[in-house]
Amino acid sequence: MNSSTAYSPACPIPIRDYPRVLLAHGGGGRLMHDLIEKMFVPAFSKLRAAERHDGAVFGAGNARLAFTTDSYVVKPLFFPGGNIGTLAINGTVNDLAMCGARPLYLSTGFILEEGLETEMLWQIVRSMKEAADIAGVELVTGDTKVVDRGKGDGIFINTAGIGIIEHGMAISP
């Protein structure tokens, strides 16, 4: 046995209980909490799970910053009051605000399904720009990937955001 196969830790979530990921693992409830606590926290030493935020708060020089990321995989893509794009911008801005931060900059990543109507994509992109302008944040970087037809529900969006904390209060859930 070589050194790369000598160590194989046991899966922290009992395989007999959940041999496959369920939709409920992404729903914000008990299964998602267990997945994060038992799998991701032990694997990522810098994960700040103890904060229980949708974002991390940390120091950078003399500044206190908040950083968050979220993915949006909703159906329908358009709904009363907005669409997946407005949800992505406003959700990330909200996560930063819940950390006590003033949102500054966002990134976005698009996973587009082949065959998505470009007019629909343009409506989503325009609404993201409008939501960012209203929130006073800048979209400063991004990425786009295209997946095979039938593999992406039209569009998935990931956003990440960074904000500055301009007060001394500790904000926690």
Image (spheres, rainbow, N blue to C red):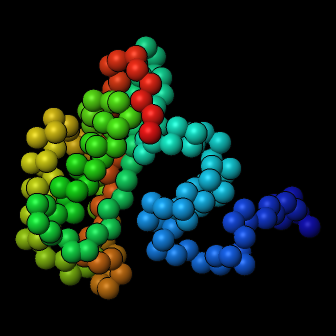
Across and down, in percent, residue 172 comes to 45, 34
Across and down, in percent, residue 80 comes to 11, 66
Which quarter of the rendering shows the C terminus? Answer: top left
**Residue at the spot x=46%, y=65% of the render?**
26
Q: In this orientation, does residue 15 appear?
A: yes
Left or right: 22 as drawn, with respect to 80: right
Across and down, in percent, residue 139 comes to 22, 43
Left or right: 4 as drawn, with respect to 119: right
Q: In this orientation, does residue 142 appear?
A: no
Which quadrant holds residue 140? top left
Which quadrant holds residue 149? bottom left
Across and down, in percent, residue 111 comes to 31, 67
Left or right: 169 as drawn, with respect to 33: left
Check the image and name the residue furthest to the top.
62
**Residue at the spot x=9%, y=48% of the render?**
130
- Residue 162 vs 150, above or below: the answer is above
- Residue 169 vs 123, above or below: the answer is above
Nearer the observer, 42 or 146: 42
Left or right: 126 as drawn, with respect to 91: left
**Residue at the spot x=40%, y=20% of the render?**
169
